[in-house]
Amino acid sequence: MSIMITGGAGYVGSHLAHALNEAGERVVVLDNLSTGFRASIPGNVPLIAGSIGDMALVTWAIAEYGIRTIFHCAAATVVPDSLSDPVFYYRNNTFASLALIEAAIAGGVEHFVFSSTAAVYGNTKFNPVREDALTLPTSPYGSSKLVTELMIEDIAKVHPIKYAALRYFNVAGADPALRTGQSGRKPTNLIKVAVQAALGISERVQIFGNDYDTPDGTCIRDYIHVSDLVRAHMNILDYLRGGGENITLNCGYGHGYSVLDVIAAVKSVSRTNFPIVYRERRAGDPAAVVADVSNLNRLLCWKPMYDDLEAIVAHTLAWERALLDRKSPA
Ligand SMILES: NC(=O)c1ccc[n+]([C@@H]2O[C@H](COP(=O)([O-])OP(=O)(O)OC[C@H]3O[C@@H](n4cnc5c(N)ncnc54)[C@H](O)[C@@H]3O)[C@@H](O)[C@H]2O)c1
C-alpha cells in the first residue's frame, strides 16, 4: 500500500513527504515542479515529474506503485495571481483535480486527503469560523478549491473512496530539523516576508490596511506551524484507515495574530529592525479569519507542538538563513 503526495515537492507536501517517509510509509511524489523543488523531497522518495491533470500518467503511477492513498497538495496558490489569471487557476486547481480524482477512483484509491483552504470562507462574519459556515470565496483561488471540495463530496457519494478535506489556515514555520521549508520564489506568507526583511533580503514589509475593525487595525490570521499541520495529516490517515467517515476539517490553532503582532515577533526573535510601509487594503482581504478547531480536536488525537508565534518565527528564520547559506557557499 503506497501513498502518493501530489505537490510533494512544495512547501506543505515536502514536509508531509519527510514525515510519512520517516514513519516507514511507502511514498511517491507527483509534482510538475512549477513551484516545487526536487531537493525538498527525501532522497529515497521517487518523484514523478508531471501534472495531476495528465490522466494517463496518474493512471500509470497508481497501478505501478499500488497507490491506495492520495494526499492532494498540488495547486497554484497565489491569491492575487488567481485574480489576474482565473482561467489558469480553474484549469490547474479544479479541472486537473477532476482528472486526478477520476484516475484515483478508476485505480481503486481508497483514501483521498485534499489540501483545502480557509479562503473558501471569504469574508466570514463569524470568528472562530466553523466548517459549516457559509462558504463565499472572494478569489478564483478560493473558488477553485471550494469547487474541488464539492466535486470530491459528490463523487464519494457514488464511488468507494473516503475523503478528508483539510481547510488549512495560514501555514507557517519550517521543519525544525531544516530538511525542508518554504523555498518558493514568490513568498506571500507574512511571516516569511517579514523574516526576509529582517535578513535584508527585502527592504521593507508592506502592510495592506490599518483601518480594519480589529484591536490594532491590521488583519488577524490563524498561523499554524507546518509540522503541526503535517501531524494532523498523519492523524487523518489513521482516521481514514480506521474506517472514519468523510470529513471536512479546519486546520489552525483557534486563535490569531495581527499583522503588527507578527512583525513585532519577527523583530524581537531576529533582534533586527526593518521599515514597514502602510498601503491601501487589498481587495478581498477579510479583517480576521480564525479557525474553530473543535472538530479537529474531537475527531483526531491531535496534539500541536508549536502553537507559539515565536517558535514559528524562529523556525522560519532558521530556514531562511539555511537557504541563504546554500546560495552563497563559503
Ligand atoms: N501554504 C499555505 O498557507 C496554505 C494555506 C491554505 C491552503 N494551502 C494549500 O496547500 C497546498 C500546498 O500549498 P503550498 O503552500 O505547499 O504550495 P507550494 O506552491 O509550495 O506547493 C504546491 C506544489 O504543487 C505543485 N504543482 C502545482 N500545480 C501542479 C500540477 N498541475 N501538477 C503537479 N504538481 C503541481 C508545485 O510544483 C508545488 O510543488 C495547496 O493545495 C494550497 O492550496 C496552503
Image (spheres, rainbow, N blue to C red):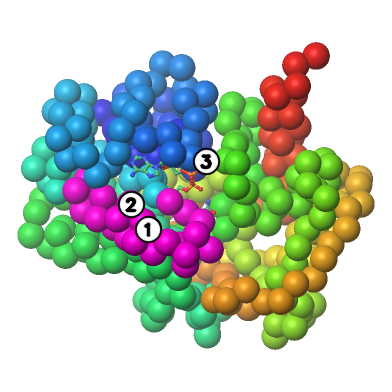
Residue 55 visible in image = yes
Label annotation for residue 11: 3
Mark 1 vs mark 3, foreground winner is: 1
Dominant secondary structure of the magenta stretch? helix
**Location of residue 86 in the rendering, given as x and y in whole percent from the top left corner:** 39, 64
Instruction: Tell me residue 168's x, y (percent).
Output: 48, 57
Quadrant housing the C terminus? top right
Which element type, helix, strand or loop, lies under badge 2? helix
* Closest to the observer, 46 or 55: 55
* Disc 1 + disc 2, Cβ < 8 Å: yes
Region rendered in magenta? 76-101
Q: Is the distance from the Cβ of mark 2 to the nearest ligand 1 atom less than 8 Å?
A: yes
Q: CA distance from mark 3 to mark 2?
A: 17 Å
For residue 116, side relative to residue 312 (left or right): left
Upstream in sequence: badge 1 or badge 3: 3
Identify residue for label 1. Answer: 89
Could you tell me which residue is drawn at 57 percent across and 58 percent down?
170
Q: Position of residue 188 (x, y in %)?
A: 61, 54
Up-down relation of residue 322 to residue 245 (above or below):
above
- Disc 1, SS: helix
Judge: label 3 CB < 8 Å from ligand 1.
yes
Residue 180 magenta-highlighted? no
What's the residue type where badge 2 is placed?
Asn
Q: Amino acid at mark 1?
A: Tyr
| Tag 2 residue | 92
